[in-house]
Amino acid sequence: MAITDWPAGERPREKLLQRGAQALSDAELLAIFLRTGITGKTAVDLARELLASFGGLRPLIDATQTEFCHAKGLGAAKFVQLQATMEIARRHLLETLSRDSALTSPALTRQYLKARLRDYRHEVFLCLFLDSQHQVLAAEELFQGSIDGASVYPREVVKRCLFHNAAAVIFAHNHPSGIAEPSDADVRITKRLTQALALIDVRVLDHVVVGETLVSLAERGLL
C-alpha cells in the first residue's frame, strides 16, 4: 500500500506537521528525507531496511560516500543532500550559540562541539573565540592530526586570538576512537596554550574532549 493511501495521522509528513518532528521514529524521519521508495517498497519500508542494514541512524549518517552510495535507494545526490542538511544543523547551532554566553549555555556549547567534531575519522583541534561577555566570536578548526605530536602550535593560536580580538577561548578536539578520556598529551598542550595566551590576557576557559561522550578538563581540574 502506498503511503498516500495510509490514514493521514500515520503519514510521516502529516504526522510531523500535526505533532512535530520529535514525534516521528527514526524510520519516519529518514523516509521524509528519502521522499520516495523503490519498486515494491514505500519510503518507510526502505528507511527501515536501510536502518537495519547500517545498524541505526548514526552509522548511516557517519557512512563514507562509497558506503552510502552503494546502499539500495541511495546515491550521490542523496549523499550531498545529507551532508548539506548536517552542515545546516551545525551552523544553526553555532548561530544560536553566538547569541548567548558560552558559559551560561553549557549544554548548547557541548551540543555544538559534539555535532562539529564527533564524526571526524581523524583528530581535529577546534577553538571557540569568545569576547569579554563570553559570547562566541568565531569557531575555527586550527589543526588536524594527532594532538600527541607537534601538531598544535601555541603561536598560531595566539595569532588567531589577536585576529578575533578574543578575551577568552574554549578548546575542543575529538578522539576518533570514541573514548573521550583526556590523555597526558591533552593536558600538556592545554597548559602550554594557557601559558602562551596568558601573555596576551586571553583566558582559557575549558578544553573539551569529544568522543561518544564529552569530557571537560576544567571540570576535571586539569586546566
Image (cartoon, rainbow, N blue to C red):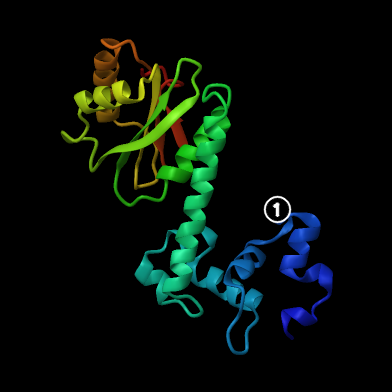
Q: Position of residue 83 (x, y in %)?
A: 45, 59
For the residue pair 87 and 119, the one nearer the viewer reads as 87
For the residue pair 218 and 126, the one nearer the viewer reads as 126
The answer to whether 20 is drawn above or below residue 106 in the figure is below
Left or right, residue 131 beside residue 2: left
Q: For the C terminus, give its image quadrant.
A: top left
Residue 194 at least partly seen? yes
For the residue pair 104 and 56, the one nearer the viewer reads as 104
Question: Where, by quadrant of the figure, is residue 185 drawn?
Answer: top left
The answer to whether 71 is drawn above or below residue 212 in the figure is below
Q: For the N terminus, give its image quadrant.
A: bottom right
Q: Which residue is mark 1?
A: 22
In the image, farthest residue toward the bottom: 39
Label 1 crowd bin: few (<14), some (14–19), many (20+), radius 10 Å: few
Q: Amino acid at mark 1?
A: Gln
Q: Residue at x 48, y 68 (%)?
A: 54
Q: Residue at x 47, y 28 (%)?
A: 136
